């Protein structure tokens, strides 16, 4: 595990976000998946902090960050992390986001392009119809099941890690966010930063959507030529033998990410 060299709270619109800084080198903002920051900020963070100055941020209402009374939105979350970077005097960084954090990273790239160096998206789509129908259905049920799900989490080790979190509130707001329709395809077309897309071969996101995502970024348009000189600056990696929920435990994800970011 990595030890933070700095941690604290940064003011954002209406609340404060918790952040940690690990390692030395070029700045890399890491954005966790939904509900549980610790899954991305354990071994995965350590894997990247050996090569980069990692800024790990807990999203609004998650982990050690504070919440506000307003509904969550991915756009607000992207503005939040931009505010944290400015608070820490970081003008430009690469961004790596997983799942919920990957969606935030996409919106960060669209809304704050001047602050972005390179982009790594792990297991996150650009439109709601990219998810399988059963995934969408699960989010539709979540607000009504928030009491039961949140109550169960409140009795788990996760509650000991984040004792101030209102888990019923988190599950209700997560469900409300998850049912919102969105399609960011036009915004994705504007992303100029080199981008690495990483997905599981058994992801919660349809493979057709993965291909369309890569094509929106300029990939998959033609043969790259004998020397590869005609390929897109963006990259696509499919990790075998993993799912949406296990992909962040795959060392290959971080091997690909380090090589891409350092290339």
Image (cartoon, rainbow, N blue to C red):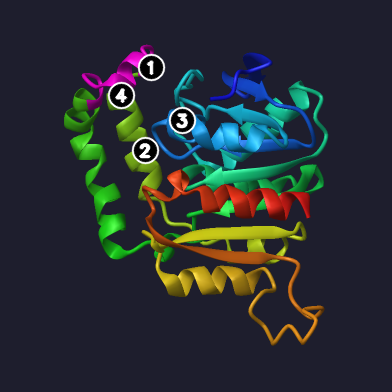
Can you say whether 119 is above or below 5 in the image?
A: below
**Membership of 163 in magenta stretch:** yes
Of the two numbered discs 4 and 3 in the rendering, the one whose residue sits closer to the viewer: 3
Q: Which residue is mark 4?
A: 167
Q: Earlier in the sequence, mark 2 or mark 3?
A: 3
Q: Label 4, label 1: how many angstroms apart (C-alpha)?
A: 12 Å
The x and y percentages for residue 168 are: 27, 26
Q: Which mark is residue 161?
A: 1
The x and y percentages for residue 251 are: 51, 48
- Mark 2: few/some/many CA within 10 Å (<14, 14-19, 20+): many
Q: Secondary structure at mark 4?
A: helix
Q: Which residue is mark 2?
A: 174
The x and y percentages for residue 197 are: 58, 60
Q: Label 4, label 3: how many angstroms apart (C-alpha)?
A: 13 Å
Q: Earlier in the sequence, mark 4 or mark 1?
A: 1
Of the two numbered discs 2 and 3 in the rendering, the one whose residue sits closer to the viewer: 3
Q: Label 2, label 3: how many angstroms apart (C-alpha)?
A: 14 Å
Q: Which mark is residue 37?
A: 3
Q: Is residue 148 left or right of residue 20?
A: left
- Mark 1: few/some/many CA within 10 Å (<14, 14-19, 20+): few
The x and y percentages for residue 60 are: 51, 27
Of the two numbered discs 4 and 1 in the rendering, the one whose residue sits closer to the viewer: 1
Q: Secondary structure at mark 2?
A: helix
Of the two numbered discs 1 and 2 in the rendering, the one whose residue sits closer to the viewer: 1
Q: From which residue to which does the magenta span run?
A: 153-165
Q: Label 2, label 4: how many angstroms apart (C-alpha)?
A: 10 Å
Q: Secondary structure at mark 1?
A: helix
């Amino acid at each position: 595990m990595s030890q933070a060299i700095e941690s604290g709270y940064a003011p954002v619109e209406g609340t404060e976000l918790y952040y940690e800084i690990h390692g030395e080198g070029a700045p890399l903002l890491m954005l966790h998946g939904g509900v549980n920051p610790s899954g991305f900020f354990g071994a995965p963070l350590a894997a990247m902090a050996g090569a980069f100055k990692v800024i790990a941020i807990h999203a609004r209402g998650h982990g050690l960050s504070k919440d506000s009374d307003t509904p969550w939105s991915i756009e607000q979350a992207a503005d939040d992390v931009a505010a944290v970077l400015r608070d820490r005097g970081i003008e430009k960084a690469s961004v790596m986001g997983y799942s919920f954090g990957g969606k935030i990273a996409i919106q960060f790239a669209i809304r704050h392009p001047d602050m972005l160096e390179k982009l790594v998206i792990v297991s996150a789509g650009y439109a709601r119809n990219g998810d399988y129908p059963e995934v969408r259905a699960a989010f539709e049920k979540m607000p009504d099941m928030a009491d039961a799900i949140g109550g169960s989490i409140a009795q788990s080790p996760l509650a000991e890690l984040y004792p101030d979190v209102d888990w019923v509130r988190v599950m209700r707001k997560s469900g409300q966010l998850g049912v919102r329709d969105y399609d960011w395809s036009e915004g994705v077309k504007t992303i100029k930063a080199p981008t690495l897309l990483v997905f599981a071969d058994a992801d919660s996101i349809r493979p057709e959507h993965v291909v369309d995502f890569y094509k929106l970024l300029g990939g998959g348009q033609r043969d790259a030529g004998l020397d590869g000189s005609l390929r897109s600056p963006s990259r696509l990696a499919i990790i075998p033998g993993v799912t949406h929920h296990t992909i962040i435990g795959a060392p290959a994800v971080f091997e690909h990410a380090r090589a891409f970011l350092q290339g």
